[in-house]
Amino acid sequence: MARKTSTVFDVRRTPTQSRSQVTLEVILEAAAQVFSEHGYAAGTTNRIAQRAGVSVGSFYQYFPNKDAVLVALVESRVNAGMRSVESLLSDAVGTEVDLEALLRSFVTAMVTLHGHEPDLHRVLFEEAPHPPELHECVLQTEEALAHTWLSILQQLPRVVVSDADTAAHLVVQLTEALTHRFVLHGLHDLSTEKFIEEVVTLLTRYLMDPNPSIKTPSIQT
């Protein structure tokens, strides 16, 4: 999921030595803590530098501004969080899978991902400004997941959608949107287990033939 960012959001000092890499990671972790506790507007570079135990001058050697920290933080959190989800889906490609069980594992993984550091998640994706670089990071992640889902849907005979590519994107984006809303704001007092089952039911009925004994046309890609 490597991407190119515009110069204004690039890390100023590329950490070529282990000490520099550690400093970069310390600053990002400090930013995560400060944003979680104070929000984005009050999460100043001075507070981030103080929490990281570095001077403001050292901070600016790595990041030109607070938005650059935001983009780097989102990228690191999204990439780290999605590794397990991508692994879950990749293991299902080319194998006989129970689609309903896979959907349940996928939705559960997304709920777990959104539930990790919920205060930070709210700040990053609801409170903070969204520069193009942030959108690009999220878009690339969604595209990667949708591409894997496309491979899975194409191999399942009971999938009856007319456009597998569109269906794969909807599976990812619907799950993302619903889990984000549920984890951060709740939904009709549903428990986590009930929410997961409702989303799985929604996706299963959209994707699968309810009458497997009746021959259905192949999906179109």
Image (cartoon, rainbow, N blue to C red):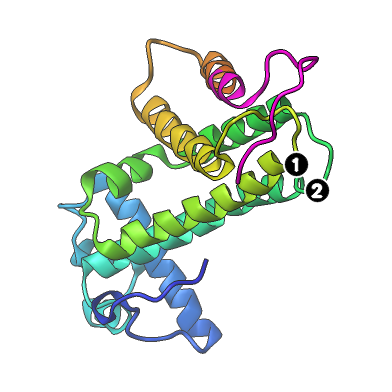
- Asked if the stretch drawn in magenta spans residue 101, the answer is no
Q: Residue at x 41, y 54 (%)?
A: 138
Depth check, mark 1 against mark 2: the one in front is 1
Can residue 93 be seen at all in this image of the molecule? yes
Can residue 30 be seen at all in this image of the molecule? no
Mark 1: amino acid: Gln
Relative to the observer, which residue lies in front, 146 or 27?
Answer: 146
Res 122 → quadrant: top left
Magenta region, main secondary structure: loop
Picture layout, residue 122 above or below residue 41: above
Picture layout, residue 130 above or below residue 162: below
- How many numbered discs? 2
Q: Is the C-beta separation of discs 1 and 2 under 8 Å?
A: yes
**Outermost residue to the left:** 41
Q: Which residue is mark 2?
A: 94
Picture layout, residue 215 above or below residue 176: above
**Outermost residue to the right:** 96
